[in-house]
Image (cartoon, grey):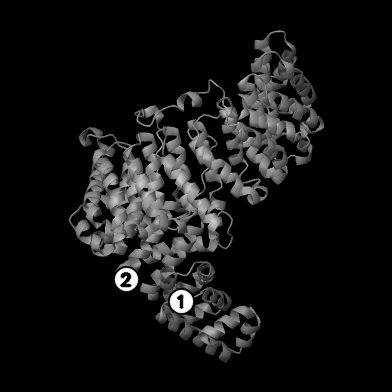
């Protein structure tokens, strides 16, 4: 509507907004609250678009807005606060002449008796800081502001969270209790992103408490340790009062300690051991909300707790926190269970090296939790177990640990129905556990793989005919089953072949590759690559079909748009794995793929917006193609050599990089002149190695460099190359290859 009113209309002398807006501003002074509210709400809609008539009338708008700041109607005051927040975000220059008064008003409104007004006003502080407004203007108000925010973080007596917090752990969860969850498809060569902070783990609605905590958090990042002399005395006073009547203030203070845990960490670190010592007893507080928020706050300091373990007192502190989390994982209160499980998952990721020696008590607590938890917290428990498996890896293969972990996991596996959505986190958990157990997962592999095939089979039918399948179509079942199949394949390696041979997984996989959903394609291609690595003989009967599928995902620029980038990444990786295993049989795919991945490598020379995982996979696959089909690539080497070399130098040392360099050597043996204009990139790429484990490759590179040296000496350009090459690089190459 705002845009429609701010346009020329045939037959009208003026745009509608030019007529309407001045009249709406006049209604700000109406004696009727409804008209004041509607007029202000209408004008506020134009702040984002900012039509010319509003710019012209900005002084009148602000004058009317400020006059409404003391309106007796809460809905009007809420709209005033909303307007100020929008202006500070979008048009802060208009507020600058009035900023001191604005800050004072928003501070007053943040403690408004009406919670909706207070919430709207509280948004101002984050907006102010995030839009890089002057910290100095705010500094003198910090004592009042911090006090107000801390007060707003205290639960009200009638808060739903306070009422719901008494839920005991044995009460079944309803569907309404379960948060939506989303599976992330398997991706080779990608990195995850940090999740956003949640200041109230169990509450899904944004409220004054969470907004105030978020405001305190961002203030701590802006003002840093300068916030501590104001905040810490308030916190210490509240924490010192262990009376029943003050438990909500105690809880809010623990939340505040967590909220400033990043922004004020420099000032907090010297006193961190004492602070943790004060927090640990609160894990035993009679109020579940205090116990749960203490778990969350301690988890915010996990990084620093883990870093302190190099000293004996740090070890004791770590053990105390870990023991506290494990005890609360078995709490009888659901909310505490959830917070403790999440806190433990955070701690274990920060303290990977400390987990193996403590694995037995950890597994005992987690395994017992399977018998206590209801549906909602089981999801979090599965995640904690999966994260643990990812962290400790092969350490989990000890038969003692398997005997503790696998019985409750397999019991849940047997209890849950195939198409119950609660199976998703269990499938994800099994994927991590399978990869950690490796060959030790063999006793469970056949049953798991058979169920995955059944789930995929039924869902492929359901996609076209749900009635015939007896189940509703949901692609997430396919994705999770494919990813678990990948995990099992990776775990068992070549010993998976008999299980694949007697299943229909290969044909199901080919059908999945044709499903019109990027996440299904992504997981399908990941499984194709894993099957190729472990048992290529089971892929060979449909090799040409799989090659066609992969090539189709790398066909033209549209294959590399954002929403398809992960599909292209996995297709490229799978082709590289196929090349290594089927060698010359990959030839039909080489030229079509080459024509599409070389532009990706070339574009990577301008790294802005480039997907690094895709670029590196393209380089590795190109190198593998060159290794197995050098005669096909050698004639075109001059077209891709420079971006290829520039990408190789940034890839970490591993077997895949070795195979790519073998391809480089093979191509340059056939077409050495391709490197005549790429000597410096070639030297940089070779110099990027810290250590080459393959003696064969090292000898090939030595021979290659000696050949180029002789050629360039004869051409009289070798000395010029030496003079233009970095001294440290020359020293390294001379020591390694004698050039």
Q: Residue at x 41, y 65 (%)?
A: 621
> To which quarter of the image does residue 625 belong?
bottom left
The answer to which of 475 and 733 lies nearer the viewer is 733
Residue 517 placement (x, y as % from top left): 37, 44
Screen quadrant of the N terminus: top right
Report the Cα–Cα distance between label 1 and label 2.
23 Å
Residue 520 placement (x, y as % from top left): 35, 47
Q: Residue at x 75, y 40 (%)?
A: 135
> To which quarter of the image does residue 468 belong?
top left
Q: Is residue 572 above or below residue 450?
A: below
Q: Secondary structure at mark 2?
A: helix
Sequence order check, earlier mark of 1 and 2 = 2
The answer to which of 73 and 51 lies nearer the viewer is 73
Q: Secondary structure at mark 1?
A: loop
Screen quadrant of the C terminus: bottom right
- Can residue 722 be seen by looking at this rendering? yes
Q: Identify the residue under disc 2.
A: 583
Residue 117 placement (x, y as % from top left): 64, 22
- Can residue 513 be seen by looking at this rendering? no
Q: Is residue 540 left or right of residue 680?
A: left
Residue 643 placement (x, y as % from top left): 53, 67
Q: Are marks 1 and 2 in contact (CB under 8 Å)?
A: no
Q: Which mark is residue 469?
A: none
The answer to which of 335 and 725 lies nearer the viewer is 335
Q: Is residue 91 left or right of residue 341?
A: right
Judged from this view, the residue extending furthest toward the bottom is 714
Q: Identify the residue under disc 1.
A: 692
Q: Is residue 136 above or below residue 722?
A: above
Judged from this view, the residue extending furthest toward the right is 97
Q: Crowdedness of circle 1 by 10 Å Cα count: few (<14), some, many (20+)? A: some
């Amino acid at each position: 509507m705002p845009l429609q009113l701010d346009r020329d209309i045939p037959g009208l002398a003026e745009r509608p907004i030019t007529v309407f807006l001045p009249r709406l501003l006049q209604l700000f002074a109406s004696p009727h609250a409804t008209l004041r509210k509607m007029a202000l709400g209408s004008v506020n809609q134009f702040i984002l678009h900012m039509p010319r008539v509003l710019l012209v009338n900005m002084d009148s708008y602000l004058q009317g807005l400020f006059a409404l700041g003391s309106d007796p109607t809460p809905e009007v005051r809420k709209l005033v606060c909303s307007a100020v927040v929008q202006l500070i975000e979008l048009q802060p220059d208009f507020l600058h002449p009035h900023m001191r008064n604005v800050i004072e008003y928003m501070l007053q409104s943040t403690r408004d008796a009406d919670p909706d007004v207070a919430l709207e006003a509280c948004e101002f502080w984050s907006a102010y800081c995030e839009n890089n407004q002057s910290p100095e203007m705010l500094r003198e108000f910090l004592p009042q502001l911090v006090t107000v925010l801390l007060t707003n973080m205290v639960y009200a007596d009638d808060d739903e969270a306070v009422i719901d917090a008494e839920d005991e752990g044995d009460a079944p969860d309803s569907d309404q209790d379960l948060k939506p969850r989303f599976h992330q498809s398997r991706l080779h060569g990608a990195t995850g992103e940090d999740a956003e902070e949640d200041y109230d783990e169990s509450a899904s609605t944004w409220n004054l408490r969470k907004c105030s905590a978020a405001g305190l958090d961002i203030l701590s990042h802006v003002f840093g340790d300068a916030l501590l002399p104001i905040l810490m005395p308030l916190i210490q006073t509240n924490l010192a009062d262990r009376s029943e009547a003050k438990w909500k203030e105690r809880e809010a203070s623990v939340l505040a300690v967590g909220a400033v845990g990043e922004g004020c960490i420099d000032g907090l670190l010297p006193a961190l051991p004492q602070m943790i010592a004060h927090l640990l007893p609160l894990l035993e507080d009679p109020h579940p909300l205090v116990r749960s928020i203490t778990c969350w706050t301690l988890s915010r300091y996990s990084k620093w707790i883990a870093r302190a373990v190099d000293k004996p007192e740090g070890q004791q502190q770590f053990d105390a926190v870990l023991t506290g989390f494990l005890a609360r994982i078995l709490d009888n209160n659901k909310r505490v269970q959830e917070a403790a499980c999440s806190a433990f998952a955070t701690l274990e990721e920060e303290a990977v090296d400390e987990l193996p020696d403590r694995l037995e008590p950890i597994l005992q607590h987690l395994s017992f939790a399977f018998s206590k938890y209801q549906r909602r917290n089981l999801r979090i428990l599965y995640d904690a177990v999966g994260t643990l498996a990812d962290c400790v890896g092969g350490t989990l293969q000890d038969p003692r640990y398997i005997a503790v972990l696998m019985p409750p996991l397999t019991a849940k596996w047997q209890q849950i129905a195939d198409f119950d959505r609660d199976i998703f986190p269990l499938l994800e958990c099994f994927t991590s556990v399978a990869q950690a157990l490796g060959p030790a997962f063999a006793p469970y592999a056949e049953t798991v793989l058979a169920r995955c095939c059944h789930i995929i089979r039924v869902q492929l039918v359901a996609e076209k005919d749900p009635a015939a399948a007896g189940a509703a179509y949901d692609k997430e079942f396919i994705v999770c089953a494919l990813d678990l199949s990948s995990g099992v394949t990776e775990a068992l390696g070549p010993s998976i072949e008999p299980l694949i041979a007697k299943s229909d997984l290969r044909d199901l996989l080919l059908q999945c590759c044709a499903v019109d959903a990027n996440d299904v394609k992504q997981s399908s291609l990941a499984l194709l690559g894993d099957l190729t690595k472990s048992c290529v003989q089971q892929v060979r009967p449909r090799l040409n079909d799989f090659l066609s599928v992969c090539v189709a995902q790398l066909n033209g620029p549209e294959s590399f748009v954002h929403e398809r980038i992960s599909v292209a990444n996995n297709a490229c990786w799978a082709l590289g794995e196929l090349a290594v295993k089927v060698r010359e049989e990959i030839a039909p795919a080489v030229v079509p793929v080459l024509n599409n991945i070389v532009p990706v490598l070339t574009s990577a020379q301008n790294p802005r917006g480039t997907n690094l995982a895709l670029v590196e996979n393209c380089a590795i696959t190109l190198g593998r193609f060159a290794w197995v089909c050098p005669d096909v690539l050698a004639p075109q080497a001059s077209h891709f050599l420079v971006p290829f070399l520039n990408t190789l130098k940034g890839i970490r040392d591993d077997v895949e990089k070795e195979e790519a360099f073998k391809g480089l050597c093979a191509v340059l043996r056939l077409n050495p002149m391709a490197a005549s204009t790429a000597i410096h990139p070639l030297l940089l790429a070779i110099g990027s190695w810290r250590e080459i484990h393959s003696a064969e490759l090292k000898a090939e590179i030595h021979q290659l460099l000696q050949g180029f040296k002789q050629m360039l000496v004869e051409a009289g350009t070798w000395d010029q190359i030496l003079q233009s090459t970095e001294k440290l690089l020359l020293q390294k190459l001379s020591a390694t290859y004698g050039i």
